[in-house]
Amino acid sequence: HIPAAMKQQWVTMSAQMTPKAIAQVTNTSRRTINRVLRLSHLTGSVVRRPLESGRPHLLSAADVLYLLSCIECTPDIFLLELQHALHKARGVEVSEITIGQTL
């Protein structure tokens, strides 16, 4: 792991030095230097951030839209009924709790 401060220093150095020179001075591979400089150029950051953190969603956006349309048609529908409808229509099996938390 390379600290973000060190990566930022490489970006600062790149204003006056070539990636090859930075690699030699810092005893780092040229490939690593180039990756950090490219990331900085593309994103403005020297650290990659995941798009989403945590566990992946069990329900897709289409699944959620289906559930919402069920609720729109039948506003007093129970979670158990939503669970069965989702399984029958979309082949997705999730708990009532998951449906409740998603909505």
Image (cartoon, rainbow, N blue to C red):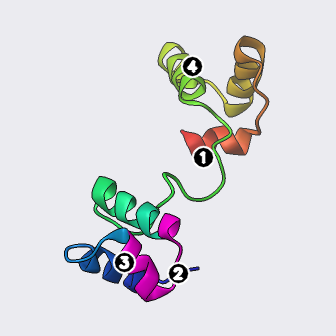
Report the Cα–Cα distance between label 3 and label 2: 18 Å
- Residue position marked by numbered label 2 in the rendering: 2
Q: Amino acid at mark 3?
A: Ala
Image coordinates for residue 26, horizontal then vertical, percent: 45, 86
Q: Is residue 10 left or right of residue 61?
A: left
Does the magenta segment cover residue 24? Answer: yes
Q: Write the residue at 33% across / 66% down.
A: 45
Disc number placed over residue 101 in the picture, else none = 1
Q: Amino acid at mark 2?
A: Ile
- Residue position marked by numbered label 3 in the rendering: 21
Q: Write the residue at 29% across / 58% down.
A: 41
Q: Write the residue at 37% across / 58% down.
A: 38
Report the Cα–Cα distance between label 4 and label 3: 57 Å
Q: Earlier in the sequence, mark 4 or mark 2?
A: 2
Q: Earlier in the sequence, mark 3 or mark 1?
A: 3
Q: Secondary structure at mark 4?
A: helix
Residue depth check, mark 2 versus mark 1: number of the one nearer the observer: 2
